[in-house]
Amino acid sequence: MTPTGPLVELHDVTVAYGRRPVVWNVDLVIDEPCLFGIIGPNGAGKSTLLKAALGLVPLVGGEVRFFGEPLGRVRSRVGYVPQRETVDWDFPVNVMDVVLMGTYGRLGWFRRPGDRERRLARECLDRVGLADVAGRQIGRLSGGQQQRVFLARALAQQADIYFLDEPMAGVDVRSQERIFHVLDDLKAAGSLVVVVHHDLRTAAEWFDRVALVDRRVVAAGRTGETLTPENLQRTYAGHVDVLDDLAQAIAARGRTP
Amino acid sequence: MTSWLQLGEAGVGLGGIHAWAMATAAVIAASCGLVGTLLVVRRMSLVGDAISHAVLPGIAVAVLAGGRPGGPLVFLGAVAAAMLTVWLTQGLRAAGGLAEDAGAGVVFTTLFAIGVVLVGLAPPGTHLDAACVLYGELAFLPFDTISIAGYAVPRSFVAGTTVLAGLVAAVVATWKLQVFTAFDPAGARAAGLPVVGVTAGLLAATAVATVASFDAVGAVLVVAMLVAPAAAAELLTRRLHRMVMVAMALGAVAACVGYLAAWRLHTSAAGMIAVVLGLEYAAAAAIAPDDGLAARVIARVRLAWRVAREDRLATVWRAEESGNRSGARPHTPHEAMVARWLELTGHLLRDGSSWRLSPAGRREAENVVRSHRLWEAWLGRHADLPLDHLHPPAEWVEHHLGAEMRERLEADMDERAADPHGREIPPEA
């Protein structure tokens, strides 16, 4: 399948929990493979925006397209790495089991992973530096290793676009380096990598493009031109009381004071 | 409750009757162990509890509408009631903001109560009786038989086996989906897998396994069969497929053992099966390989012994270093015992009333002292601590440092191989 539109296109996307909007009117177009950072303060709605793009939370307005198509038609080409703490790491599976899950979407509902999938999973583990813990129960890994297992699972999906939700949260410096290098390799191989991220220092160092987000997109573009003091000020210094008060009124079916 | 005397007076071949009752209880318990494991790993045991009660009105309506206990209509009614429970619980949360556990508590007790009322309204002779629904009638099940290839087989054994076969087939066919959805529902949805369908299927399976168990153990104790074997299996293994098999086996064993014990003691079979399940869990908690009671006690004792050995060796080494040989003498009976043990293993040599190190003992002692002094040096460099606060942490850490870490600590040091008190750090032995 050849791309017929931009890799990712969010058009006037608004996301709400119940009736309360948390992300407002996002317009975002990413038209070439790169490392793309979604940056913003805590509670800015970064993860919500990511999940909305992947159809995991419903949109109240707007639309999302990948390669010019709705997600349902290109799902296998879009990989997702959820936040580490969204799953129970005491779950009775080992590292290999988790990485193999990356192949399940392509295998369909009933076909089982075979030798080919196992070989692929082992390669992916090797790429994130975890080849020697394939048989280990996932609860016995460090936070950084757990995050790399999730990354290996996404690699096993062999997608063209990867979405990662806070992959560096609670992760040691060595694992961070390793993860960034793997993401860089993906970019070099022609994939788009979109990362929700909170650390400005590493953001400036690694991302080609960024979107500054606080309930809405404050600015987006090339990293050097976007991470300006004025834009950061506008992202991190509030100005969202208006949106919060309005969201409250909408949720209560009322009117703001 | 079943009267075992009455059973005896029935004058039937008792051996065969007991074998059938145990076989029925075992297949039922295996079904419950299977779906129970999938509920427990999803942290949904409470849902199992809710469904096992809430299916009652579904069963009652099905029976009042002419269904036979154990027949297809009854299973259909139960599945519908289970779906209604979950749907109402989620509805209450969405509409009223009621927390999920409180919502489930309101919904399933209400539905259960409606079921109890319906059962009370049932005309006599409709195969529905409150005591049977609550506690089961395991010992009487073998008397209700159907004929298969000329053999009289208890109806509930046929129903239980059919349910077990169906559940096993369904879980094997959808295994991949079960694991992914249970572990990471959001990831599974993003991968395009039918997460809602798999979860609804699990709820339906829970309803079916529950209904198959009602005749035998009743609505109250079926929860034990759903949750207890799975919880015990979770302690014993770390892979889901093994956990399922262990839970099914534990359930089946408890069914047989519980039934026999109840027969010997002339008491409720269902109650005894649940008691045995509880005992199985306690045993699993005691012998669990990772954090079981026994494993923890053993680990603690081994560490205490290792610390005592290493402390003794290091004390003798320090005494030899300072030239004060009397410092090597044990001061307590415990220290003396450790010293004698070290003599037996060839680490210490007796030297009059005191002790000195053998070459093997010296190697081990040097590594302990080396760990101690390296840690003091590292802490002195990297933590803001006064000189006299370095010794206690090193006393503790010295027993946990390995060769590789010692090397890293040494690489981090200045040129001079001395601790912050100016004492020499011995080289790796």
Image: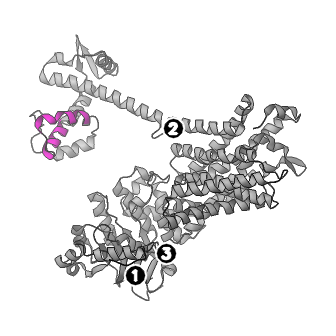
Measured as percent of width and height from the top left, residue B418 is found at 11, 37
Q: Are marks 2 and 3 on the same chain?
A: no
Residue identified by numbered label 2: B285
The structure residue drawn at horizontal position 53% and vertical position 62%, both measured from the top left corner, is B181
Tag 1: amino acid: Val
Which one is earlier in the sequence, the residue at label 3 or at label 1? 1
Is there any visible trace of residue A66 in the rendered image? no
Q: Pointer 1 indicates a residue of which chain? A: A
Residue lying at the far front of the rendered structure: A257
Q: Which residues are magenta?
A: B373-396
Measured as percent of width and height from the top left, residue B169 is found at 68, 59
B82 or A10, which is in the foreground? B82
Residue identified by numbered label 1: A13
Q: Nearer the viewer, mark 3 or mark 1?
A: 1
Cα distance in 3D space between marks 1 and 2: 51 Å
A68 or B32, which is in the foreground? B32
Q: Pointer 3 indicates a residue of which chain? A: A
Which SS class for mark 1?
A: strand
Q: Are marks 1 and 2 on the same chain?
A: no
| Residue B230 in the figure: left or right of residue B114 | left
Tag 2: amino acid: Ala
Cα distance in 3D space between marks 2 and 3: 43 Å
Residue identified by numbered label 3: A76
Is B381 colored magenta in this rendering? Answer: yes
Tag 3: amino acid: Ser
Q: Which disc is residue B282 wearing?
A: none
Give the quadrant of the C terminus of chain A: bottom left
Q: Residues within 10 Å of mark 1 (few under 14, many from 20)?
A: many
Which SS class for mark 3?
A: helix
Is A210 colored magenta in this rendering? Answer: no
